[in-house]
Amino acid sequence: MTLTFDSEVYSKLLSQYQPRVIKTEEENEHFLAVVEDLLSRSDLTPEEKTLLELLVRLIEDFENQHYQINASTPHSRILHLLEAQDLELGDLVPIFGSSELVSQVINGEMEVTREQAEMLGKFFHVDASLFFAG
């Protein structure tokens, strides 16, 4: 069964959450809470996944502008998503093949491959492009 994207449902989500360019720390905290709420759900709809991806990008944009020292990287996104979903590094072993490889990715010693990024995207219910460097 293929899930289709429903523009009306997405429009209602946009109206409910009103995502926008984040300009203050309070707005950032608000949208972080929304992201955590979405991540805590087990089966996101295609519309919720799209909203989640949009919010993550908006948060990243804000944080990149205001927290340059802690610029978001594929590795930091993995750590954030693990924390937000109350998961552990060991939960990533099936994706990377060993705890040693998980550590190398988390420590920035190894880049995420396209295949691993796809698996991470499915695992975290987000777009795989979040895990590509650059």
Image (cartoon, rainbow, N blue to C red):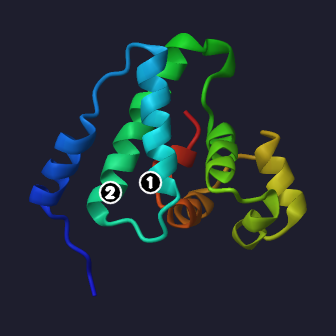
Above or below, comparing residue 34 to residue 64 in the picture: below
Q: Residues within 10 Å of mark 1 (few under 14, many from 20)?
A: some
Q: Is residue 60 left or right of residue 69?
A: left
Q: Are marks 2 and 1 in contact (CB under 8 Å)?
A: yes
Indicate the position of residue 124 as horizontal and vertical percent values. Answer: 55, 60
- Identity of the residue drawn at 28% across and 33% down: 19
Which residue occupies 60% across, 30% down? Answer: 72
- Position of 43 compared to 76: left or right? left
Query: Given the image, on which type of amino acid does mark 1 rest?
Result: Leu
Q: Is residue 68 above or below residue 110?
A: above
Q: Nearer the viewer, residue 44 or 99?
A: 44
Q: Residue 26 placed where, x, y %? A: 46, 19
| Total marks placed | 2
| Most distant residue in the bottom direction | 1
Q: What residue is disc 1 on?
A: 38
Q: Residue furthest left?
A: 8
- The answer to which image quadrant residue 76 occupies is top right
Residue ID for mark 2: 48
Compared with residue 79, is residue 98 higher up or lower down, i.e. above or below? below
- Disc 2 residue type? Glu
- Among all residues in the image, which is located at the extreme right? 100
In the rendered image, residue 4, in percent from the top left (x then y), is placed at: 20, 72
- The secondary element bearing badge 1 is classed as helix
Q: Quadrant of the N terminus?
A: bottom left
Which residue is found at the position 78% from the left and 39% from the top? Answer: 108
Residue closest to the eye, 61 or 108: 61
- The percent position of residue 112, horizontal first and vertical second, equals 66, 51
